[in-house]
């Protein structure tokens, strides 16, 4: 279950159904949704986003720590600017995926790397030995963020999501 995580500029907190409008600004945006896993398409409207948030909230109650889904909120203005996840990777769920999605006007400010480091610390504090990020090879932005977090490039695989993906790994000793 997702706990509340705080960094210098961000709060990562559990999603609420009232976050639907802010979440739609992330998951309904083509520049974001085009990179999401096949498990999630672009969200088309507010009612669909509410349903997804309800599903995520219910799912979060069943996940084992450190797994979870978080809303990424700026501390200074309390605006939700994105989402972050720690979820078991398919097909077998033995690997833990770290992911982040921000609305485009929040790109380029270091928020994704800051959120990623917070997720990694949480995962390691809760006993995880390693976390992975998987990115589509053309998603240079996500690959660069994984590297800024301190993740090491492992290679490419088709193991996850039946797609050719780049794999990055982070272990506790890799964190600054």
Image (cartoon, grey):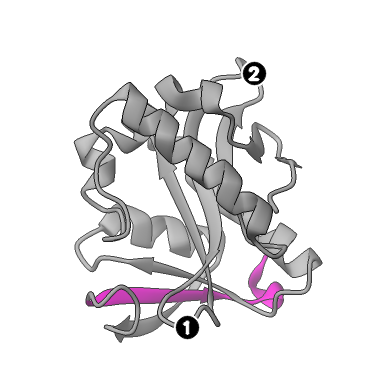
Residue at left offset 27%, top offset 26%? 45
Let me know if residue 171 is in the magenta part. Answer: yes
Which residue is identified by label 2?
A: 76
Residue at left offset 56%, top offset 54%? 116
User: Where 132 falls versus 105 (above or below)?
Assistant: below
Q: Residue furthest top?
A: 77
Which residue is identified by label 1?
A: 92
The disc label shown at residue 172, or none: none
Residue 118 seen in render: no
- Cα separation, mark 2 vs mark 1, equals 39 Å
User: Residue 55, how many percent across, how many down?
Assistant: 49, 44
Magenta span: 164-175
Q: Decide which of 100, 87 is in the foreground and name it.
A: 87
Q: In the rendered view of the protein, which quadrant contains the N terminus?
A: bottom right
User: Where 39 falls versus 23 (above or below)?
Assistant: below
Badge 1: residue crowd in 10 Å (few <14, some 14–19, many ≥20): few
The reply, left or right, for residue 5 in relation to residue 93 is: right
Q: Decide which of 144, 77 is in the foreground and name it.
A: 77
User: Residue 147, how many percent across, how many down?
Assistant: 46, 64
Which element type, helix, strand or loop, lies under badge 2? loop
> Residue 142 occupies which quadrant of the picture?
bottom left
User: Residue 99, how many percent across, how many down?
Assistant: 47, 56
Q: Decide which of 165, 22 is in the foreground and name it.
A: 22
Q: Nearer the viewer, mark 2 or mark 1?
A: 1
């Amino acid at each position: 279950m997702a706990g509340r995580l705080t960094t210098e500029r961000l709060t990562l907190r559990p999603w609420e159904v009232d976050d639907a409008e802010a979440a739609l600004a992330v998951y309904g945006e083509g520049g974001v949704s085009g990179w999401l896993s096949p498990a999630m398409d672009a969200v088309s409207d507010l009612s669909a986003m509410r349903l997804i948030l309800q599903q995520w909230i219910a799912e979060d109650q069943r996940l084992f720590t450190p797994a979870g889904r978080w809303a990424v909120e700026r501390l200074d203005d309390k605006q939700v600017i994105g989402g972050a996840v720690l979820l078991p990777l398919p097909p077998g769920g033995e690997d833990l995926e770290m992911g982040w999605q921000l609305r485009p006007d929040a790109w380029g400010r270091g928020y994704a790397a800051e959120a990623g480091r917070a997720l990694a610390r949480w995962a390691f504090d809760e006993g995880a030995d390693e976390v992975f990020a998987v990115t589509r090879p053309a998603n240079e932005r996500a690959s660069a963020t994984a590297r800024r977090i301190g993740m090491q490039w492992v290679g490419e695989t088709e193991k996850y999501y039946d797609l050719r993906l780049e794999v990055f790994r982070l272990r506790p000793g890799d964190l600054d």
